[in-house]
Amino acid sequence: MKKKYNNLLIKFFSRPETPVLVFLFFLIFIISIFTSNFLTVANLKGILEQVVVISIIALAVNQVIYGAEIDISTGSLLAVCAFVYGLVAMETGGSWIALLASLLCGFIFGLFNGFLSTYGKVPSIIVTLGMLFILRGGLLLSNPGTVLNLIEPMRFFGMGNIFGLPVSIYCLIIVIIFYHFLSFNTLWGRNIIAIGGNPRAAVNIGLPINKVRMLSFVGSGTMCGFAAAVYLGQAGQIQATAATGFELKVIAAVVLGGTSIAGGRGSNFSPIVGALLVGVILNALTLNRIPPYYELFVLGLLILIAVSFDGFRRKLLEKDV
Amino acid sequence: MNNIIKKINFYNLNRTQVLGIIFIVQMIVQSIFIPYYFSIYGFFDASRAFVEIGIISLGMTLVIISGGIDLSVGALLALVSVSIGFSYDAGFPMWAAMLLGLLAGVLGGAFNGVVIAFFRVHPLVVTLGTFALFRGIAFAISKGGAVSKFPEWFGFLGQSYVWGYVPAQLFLFLILSIIFWIILSKTSLGRYIYAIGNNIKTTTFSGIAVGKVQIYIYTLTGFLVGVAGIIHTSRIFTARGNAGFELELACIAAVVLGGARITGGSGTIAGTILGVLILNYLKDGFLFYGLRSDWGLVIIGLFLIIGVFINEFFRKK
């Protein structure tokens, strides 16, 4: 009986997200001492809702990083999809058709990203960096100075409530279950981890690495489309410069959560823990009236600490072997 | 596929020569199709806008040849600019403020290099982190404000003309280009950079201190960003936290268009300079034609992807 307990403990501490989880609770403890209105139900619910958009995209980007690729086009793609959602919603008046259009938009750009970075042999950093700017440029060119305002029924995914819980939380839960299912119950989910762990071995045993990696990009694009519905629902309005720098929050959430940037290590909960950490810190900054321009500084510092930690861990592992 | 390439390339031109021809053709086409476009004055004056990109691209060439990437240069430029402006505002003499800016650049670059070399994290992620960090510090120092009061002579670096129409900073770019060409092709450091880009493991086993070389490369790039930051501040006569926005993209696009492989191992300074010229005169032409400046984002993003695609697709096996 005691042995089993030990095993569970070891299992818990060897999970990639454990250090961050411990750190997160520690941080919440510290922040709640210094900030009087932090540990209230309303505020915590607010953080949770804020984190939904980051988490949905981070979960998908997590899969891309599993496969030792990267997607940094998510900020612009989110804005483009949100525009598509908004325009379709205003045209038709329904939020479900708009969701479909936004998903399709994300799917197409994800497919494009994925195709170029696998079959096109262009490294994914270049493709997605290029796309980050092309999409933003296109958005600025096509909607100069436009502000879209949505009315209540079109903001269902951000504002709606089912059984007392916000719809956005349900959206996140669906995405978590979806990716958890993909990771543990499908061939694709196992393949992407295998490829990230050792690409050469994956090629040698005959895995279709281009196809598997491409699908991970399709996933991140489509999830941008899904998150856009929530994002626009929460914000209520959007302009061409919206979600600038959002890709940084996503990457920060993924690497903070403990997913190795070198691929092959991580879990489907780590990006959520990472996103929560980002959300809690940004929230604490706001509550303590720290000016918003410190936000970037903190994000950068967080990413650097997380990747240094990961690098340090890999260095230790190399010494062991 | 190889036959097609051979047929196209029957003069057996190399990448740099092809780019040179493309540039000349581009200038002729732009001069014909855009009314009042070409003049000697305009030709030189356009370089005021891209000398900073050119200078940083020299360092970026080294970084990319070594198999790395530096996404933080734009943010570092903002930090340099803000350091100059706000230290002058705080009462430092101008020369000390400039020195401080240069120091900020060198230290920022060295920081990148040390984290990359010591923790062996991919440069992409490290510089993505410092991209946010440097700009965050720049915003925090400037508190969202700007400084635009400088002594008159400070404008010399970015606003004066030699012989009436050649911008002064163009000469600085020329000198730095020659220095970096020598570093890359005539020194052992240059050889090491190519070696690291080709195969980092073999290079390590050959007894070359890879980490040290990496720190040199990123520090040199930081130094160049410092120089470019001084020129930038002098040119627009303002120090502001949002300087150098999307600069990293312009630099990377120019370098890969110039023929450097994004995965490392090949690339030349001459190619990079031609890449800078082609991209920026294209942008200049677009602006001259009266198109909105947002097109710049789209063009550079497209050229980035197309450039790498051509590099990888037509690479000799």
Image (spheres, coloured by chain):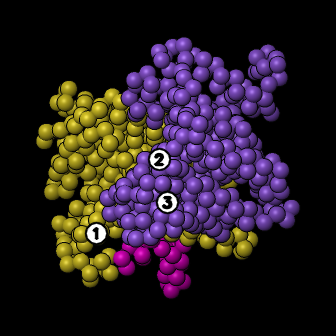
- The picture's colour for chain B is purple
Give the extent of the magenta segment: A1-27
Residue B15 located within the stretch drawn in magenta: no
Q: Residues within 10 Å of mark 1 (few under 14, many from 20)?
A: few
Q: Residue at x 30, y 77 (%)?
A: A31
Residue B58 image label: none
Q: Residues within 10 Å of mark 3 (few under 14, many from 20)?
A: many
- Mark 3 vs mark 2: in front: 2
Q: Residue at x 46, y 41 (%)?
A: A132
Looking at the image, residue A89 sits to the left or right of residue A109; the answer is: left
Helix, strand or loop: magenta stretch: helix
Mark 2 = which residue? B235
- The picture's colour for chain A is yellow
Residue B70 position, x and y percent, is: 58, 53
Looking at the image, residue A221 sits to the left or right of residue B11; the answer is: left
Mark 1 = which residue? A290
Residue located farthest toward the front when viewing the structure as drawn: B163
**Mark 3: which amino acid?**
Val
Question: How many badges with numbers are in the image?
Answer: 3
